[in-house]
Image (cartoon, helix red, strand yellow):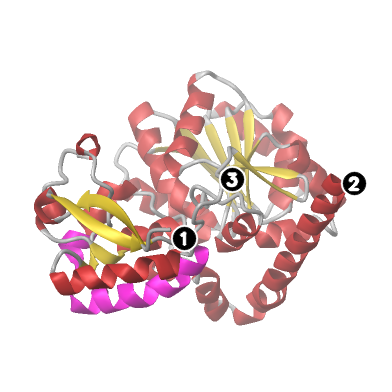
């Protein structure tokens, strides 16, 4: 067996450059050979991502990327590992090129450690990830936006839900919520916990489809296509603040209705009538899990909307009521820790107990599934 495996990559100025990896399957040990090319000057310790040489893979605008050498440690690897590379490879590399400095490079080196744990490596990627009998869509953020666009343009009626480890812990105590998720056609995976679970099942996620990152893309397509949005839920005044901030950022965005989540049951028919009168296309429901999913499931037949989407605490983030974790923390899967620091009394049980409990349940479910297959 050969000691090295040769590869041709895009080097500095996009020149065809030969490098060698150790010819073994372990990706960490395999990549140790690359440090030799840092000494030779073919690679940098930190830089743009290493890309296999193929002239057909060149993109408009990538000239600015290849002005520098590829790096063993790079931003693309980190974001791809945490499934947060929504800007795409070109956008991520350009961000690195234009914003890098010595401090950010040191931080990049540190972020690579957890990224290595999250990286899916060579596992098989499928269209769905199944957890506890619930099917999660395994698609990119852009595909999720295209799905929304397709539903609205074809005048269909669909429910869209998000699930994170906290949501899936709930199904073990709430059978009605579990049935709703089992029947749901479109469920988006949300959070690093789902990413880890999918990796444990050797069926890794393509991207993390959380609602907070989806909303900007949703707003862009809504402005472009003239879609109408309606905000339902949250504390009094929160949805209104979110509306104001979003309309400032996205000129022409049509948010045609606001209703907080503090209403009585006998007010629901009037609220449904109000929603229907606006002829809204996309209804965002923020009542928390599983209340919002149950509300959508119960009243969706009466709603004249194309999409009803459960979005949890989305309005809190975009109103400024709750600060979101900085990007570097989201890249290494520590957004949950930032939320814990913000609200320790409310969140400690969800994260300190809930996250390990979720992973234990995933292991048990995986073993039970394997045993059934053996039998």
Q: Main secondary structure of the magenta part?
A: helix
Q: Residue at x 39, y 47 (%)?
A: 216
Magenta range is 96-118
The mark nearer the N terminus, 3 or 2, is 3
The mark nearer the N terminus, 1 or 3, is 1
- Taking the image as shown, residue 299 lies to the left or right of residue 60, namely right
Could you tell me residue 333's position as x and y percent?
A: 50, 67
The disc placed on residue 82 is 1
Judging depth in this view, the residue of 124 and 205 nearest the camera is: 124
At mark 3, the secondary structure is strand
Q: Residue at x 62, y 54 (%)?
A: 198
Q: Is residue 108 above or below residue 129?
A: below
State which mark lies toward you, 2 or 1: 2
Q: Residue at x 43, y 30 (%)?
A: 227
For label 3, count other residues whose C-alpha is less than 10 Å away and answer few (under 14), some (14-19) or many (20+).
many
Residue at numbered disc 3 = 188
The disc placed on residue 155 is none
Q: Is residue 16 magenta?
A: no
Q: CA distance from mark 2 to mark 1?
A: 35 Å
Which image quadrant is residue 357 in?
Answer: bottom right
At mark 2, the secondary structure is loop
Q: Is residue 97 magenta?
A: yes
For label 1, count other residues whose C-alpha is less than 10 Å away and answer few (under 14), some (14-19) or many (20+).
many
């Amino acid at each position: 067996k050969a000691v090295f495996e040769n590869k041709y990559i895009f080097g500095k100025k996009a020149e065809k450059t030969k490098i060698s990896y150790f010819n073994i399957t372990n990706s960490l040990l395999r990549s140790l050979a690359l440090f030799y090319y840092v000494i030779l000057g073919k690679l940098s310790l930190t830089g743009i991502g290493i890309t296999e040489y193929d002239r057909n893979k060149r993109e408009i605008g990538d000239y600015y990327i290849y002005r520098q050498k590829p790096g063993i440690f790079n931003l693309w690897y980190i974001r791809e590992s945490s499934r947060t590379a929504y800007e795409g490879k070109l956008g991520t590399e350009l961000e690195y090129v234009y914003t890098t400095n010595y401090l950010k490079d040191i931080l990049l080196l540190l972020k690579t450690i957890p990224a290595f744990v999250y990286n899916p490596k060579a596992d098989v990627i499928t269209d769905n990830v199944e957890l506890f009998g619930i099917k999660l869509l395994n698609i990119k953020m852009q595909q999720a936006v295209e799905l929304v666009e397709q539903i609205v343009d074809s005048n269909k009626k669909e429910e869209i839900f998000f699930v994170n480890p906290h949501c899936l812990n709930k199904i073990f105590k709430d059978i009605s919520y579990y049935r709703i998720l089992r029947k749901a056609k479109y469920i988006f995976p949300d959070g690093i916990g789902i990413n880890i679970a999918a990796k444990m099942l050797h069926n890794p996620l393509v991207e993390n489809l959380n609602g907070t990152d989806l909303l900007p893309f949703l707003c862009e397509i809504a402005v472009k296509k003239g879609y109408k949005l309606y905000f339902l839920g949250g504390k009094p005044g929160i949805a209104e603040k979110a509306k104001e901030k979003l309309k400032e950022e996205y000129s022409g965005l049509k948010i045609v209705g606001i209703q907080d989540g503090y209403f009585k049951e006998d007010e629901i028919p009037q609220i449904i009538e109000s929603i229907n009168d606006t002829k809204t296309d996309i209804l965002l429901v923020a009542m928390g899990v599983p209340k919002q999913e149950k509300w959508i499931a119960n009243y969706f037949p009466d709603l004249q909307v194309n999409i009803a989407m459960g979005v949890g605490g989305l309005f809190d983030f975009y109103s400024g009521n709750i600060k979101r974790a900085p990007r570097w923390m989201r890249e290494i899967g520590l957004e949950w820790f930032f939320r814990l620091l913000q609200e320790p009394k409310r969140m400690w049980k969800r994260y300190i107990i809930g996250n390990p409990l979720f992973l234990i349940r995933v292991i048990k479910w995986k073993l039970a599934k394997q045993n059934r297959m053996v039998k």
